[in-house]
Image (tube, grey):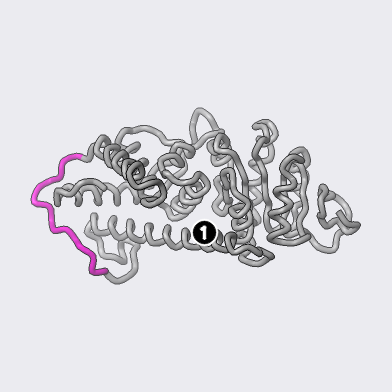
Amino acid sequence: MDKDGQATGGAFPIGGVRRQAPDILAIVADDRRAVVAEVCDAVRGERWAWTDWHGATERLEHAGSVGIVLAETRGVSEAQLAPVLPQLDAFARGAGQRVIVALDFEQIDLISAALATPGIELLCAPSLAEYVAASFVAGGGTGGVRDSGREAEAERLRQLHEQVARIAETLARLTGEATDLPARESGHVGEHGMSYRGGPAPAAASPIAARDIRDAIRARRMRDQHFGSGLFEDPAWDMLLDLFAAELERSQVSVSSLCIAAAVAPTTALRWIAKLTDAGLFERQPDPFDRRRAFMALSARASAAMRAYFGAVQRIGAPIA
């Protein structure tokens, strides 16, 4: 660290005068510091600072105009995380600043329950490219990303935002049609496309069975066995199916279980969960018996859309896909 307090590989001082606050504050234990240093240097050059988890509480209280907080939680005990996680959530919520958390799969339920503020990015066992791309996007696309693979990862994140918006729009339209409301009243604004619309039901559809939804999920996984994983990735629909089946079964789904249901990399699943929650399709429900955990469920709007969709599928005698 230089005499002005800019981080070049040391803890950022709480007191003292500095010319300029760092762009990134990293909360990281000694054994992970080299990885975080590489990420910060790739994105922001020298303007970053770090503190260990013992000093994180005090450092966050004096975060000032720090733009991004990187929290490296892998290998950190629950006892060390407990006092800091609520501060990270409040930091993101109160100042509108960005928080990126690198975690292990085993920490998903604990950390996702504590960090519920929109804009917090959870990276599960990230590669260097994922780490840098998330920091790059969080910083508004400025900085020193110097690798085409990392730029591609950043572009993939932007495409994710667009895909979630389209899914939310489609479900909103379907819900509006199911209740026979005009587009404006149902919350959907736009022209009707020329897609196929099923005719009116000749008779009431039979009740939707959770078993049928689970069978559809198993059939989707069988495609991967024959064609290889990755070809049919559709995490949003896989998670919608899983939550709908759980709703019919009156069971609860943890965040980590939903990540498994998505059948994609955990970081990708966590991003989809966050975006679908922000879009109002998923809801987070705290565990009444354990504040360290939260469950995921369909929102009322998403549930109505799923029921409308499967009712339409039943009416035309098509299989659930």
In-image side of 37 versus 189 (left or right): right
Q: Establish if 15 lies above or below 191.
A: above
Specify start and end residues of the magenta stretch as a single range. 193-207
Residue 300 visible in the picture: no
In-image side of 95 versus 64 (left or right): left
* Residue 161 falls inside the magenta stretch: no
Q: Residues within 10 Å of mark 1 (few under 14, many from 20)?
A: some
The answer to which quarter of the image holds residue 8 is bottom right
Identify which residue, 304 or 235, lies in the foreground. Answer: 235
- Disc 1 secondary structure class: helix
The answer to which quarter of the image holds residue 86 is top right
Total marks placed? 1
Q: Residue furthest right?
A: 3
The answer to which quarter of the image holds residue 212 is top left
Residue 99 visible in the picture: yes
Look at 27% across and 36% down and name the residue there: 210
Horizontal and vertical percent position of residue 32: 71, 43
In-image side of 8 versus 180 (left or right): right
Q: Residue furthest left?
A: 202
Look at 29% across and 55% down and name the residue there: 175
Main SS category, magenta section: loop
Horizontal and vertical percent position of residue 247: 33, 38
Residue marked by disc 1: 157
Look at 39% across and 50% down and name the residue there: 233
Horizontal and vertical percent position of residue 59: 77, 47
Horizontal and vertical percent position of residue 92: 63, 52
In-image side of 292 versus 49 (left or right): left
* Residue 199 falls inside the magenta stretch: yes
Identify which residue, 229 or 36, lies in the foreground. Answer: 229
Type of amino acid under label 1: Leu
